[in-house]
Every structure is written in structure tokens, then in C-alpha cells.
Amino acid sequence: MGADRFVTFEGGEGAGKSTQVARMAERLRADGAEVIVTREPGGAPFAERIRKVLLTPADRAPSPLAEALAFYSARADHLAQTIGPALSRGAWVLCDRFNDSTRAYQGAAGGVADAHLDRLDEIVVGDTRPGLTFLIDIPPEEGLARAKARRAEASADMFEARELAFHTALRDAYLAIAAAEPARCRVVDGARAPDAVADEIWDAIAAHRQSATAAEG
């Protein structure tokens, strides 16, 4: 279902994903493509309501399995209401986080078994998997510092507030995912200037777009 046009952006806190999603959307639109920019959790009305619950700081965090189930509930709505229809009509979908985030946050760092996440992917995601994923890699200390500066006086969300060891485990998990799926995943050094990051991502998207167009033709 047009999965070649489904591009996801992954990474730890403060990696700069949202900035790069916006830049790539602008460049694709300038090149004549229809582009949908979306995010997880969220991207559809019910999913956005779940987002508010998931990211609100709490005295006691839910279990990783409860978190995973909530993320997949939001993802089901997101796919049905936003991603699926956009891909069906031939639009490009640029998504800030998708199921790799669940694999990293609730799976590798949280301890939810791969078998459980495999089953949830089978039920919820099915064949609508990204054709291209960018892992914007950054040392967790730098990413957390960026996130803190970005939010100014606001409180850290439930995930930003977790200890450094959690964020280090996230980075390791993302790099393992990228190593396991090199055809889909591109690791990009997010510690560089945003322009340099954007140029590398654009070159990869342009090549991917050319390949996808040739395959469709």
C-alpha cells in the first residue's frame, strides 16, 4: 500500500527529528509531491488524546507493557485515519516516530518481550511498514541537554525525565535495529549542524524516491 512513500524518523530525546521532518516535507513539496507530516503517538484525533496521557508526567509510570498497548492503540487509529488513506492516494507520509520507537522504549529499554511486540505489529501494523527509516543518532547526554533547552521552563515529559541509563539503552536499541535492517534504516549523525543533517537525509530520500518511482513504472 504505497509503503515506499512511508518514511519514518527515529531517535532519542532531542535528536532533532521534528526539525528534519519539517525540512524534508518542505523540499518534497517544492519538488511537486503531496506530503503528509505526522507523528507518534498521535496523528489522528483519538491517538492525540492517548498522546496527552502518555506524555503527561506522573508520580508513578505505567508498566512498559501497559505503555506498549497504549502506543499500539494510538497506532491503530493513526494508521486507519491518517497513514493508510494518505498512502492509498499516493501521498508521501513523513512520520516522527513509529513502531521502532516502541521496540526501543518499551521493548529493549522497558523489557517487553519481542514476541509480544511481534504479535502487536502483526495485528496493528500488518504490511504498512516504512519503506525508509532515518535514525538520527546523538549521544544521549547531548540529546537530553537539547531537549531541556527546547522546553525552557516546562517540565520534562514522562520519557525525558527517566535516568541516563534508560536513554543509553534506547540508543543501543536503535543502533541494533538499524544494523539488523540496513536496507530500510539509515543512521545519520545528528550531532552535526542541522543543514548538514538535512542534506544527507535529502540525498537518501531523493535516491529512494527515484527507486520507488522506477519500481512503480
Image (tube, grey):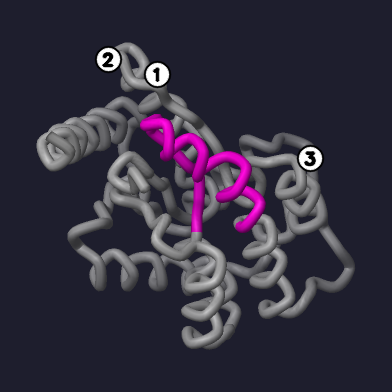
Q: Does 126 sit above or below residue 49?
A: below
Which label's residue is closer to the chain start, 3 or 2? 2
The image quarter in which residue 34 lies: top left
What residue is disc 2 on?
A: 31
Between 55 and 213, the residue placed more toward the observer is 213
Q: Mark 2 or 1, which is nearer the eye?
A: 2
Q: Give the mark, 3 or 1, whose residue is nearer the N terminus.
A: 1
* Residue under numbered circle 1: 26
Residue density around tag 2, few if under 14, some if 14–19, many if 20 or more, within 10 Å: few
The disc at residue 154 is 3
> Residue 19 at x, y = what percent?
47, 31
> Camera-side residue: 188 or 71?
71
Q: Mark 1, residues whose alpha carbon is within 10 Å: few (<14), some, or many (≥20)?
A: few
Q: Quadrant of residue 126?
A: bottom left
Q: Tag 1: residue type?
A: Glu
Q: Quadrant of residue 214?
A: top left
Residue shown at 42%/39% (left/top)?
Answer: 87
Whether label 3 touches label 1, CB < 8 Å: no
Vertical relation: 125 (above or below) 109: above
Image spot of residue 51 (x, y percent):
73, 50
Distance (Cα) linking label 3 and label 2: 37 Å
* In the image, residue 204 lies in the stretch drawn in magenta: no
- Where does the image place residue 130, in percent across and percent down from the top left? 36, 52
The magenta segment: 76-98
Q: Nearer the viewer, residue 71 or 84?
A: 84
Secondary structure at badge 3 equals: loop
- Secondary structure beneath disc 1? helix
What amino acid type should be assigned to the residue bearing mark 3? Ala
Distance between mark 3 and mark 1 Cα atoms: 29 Å
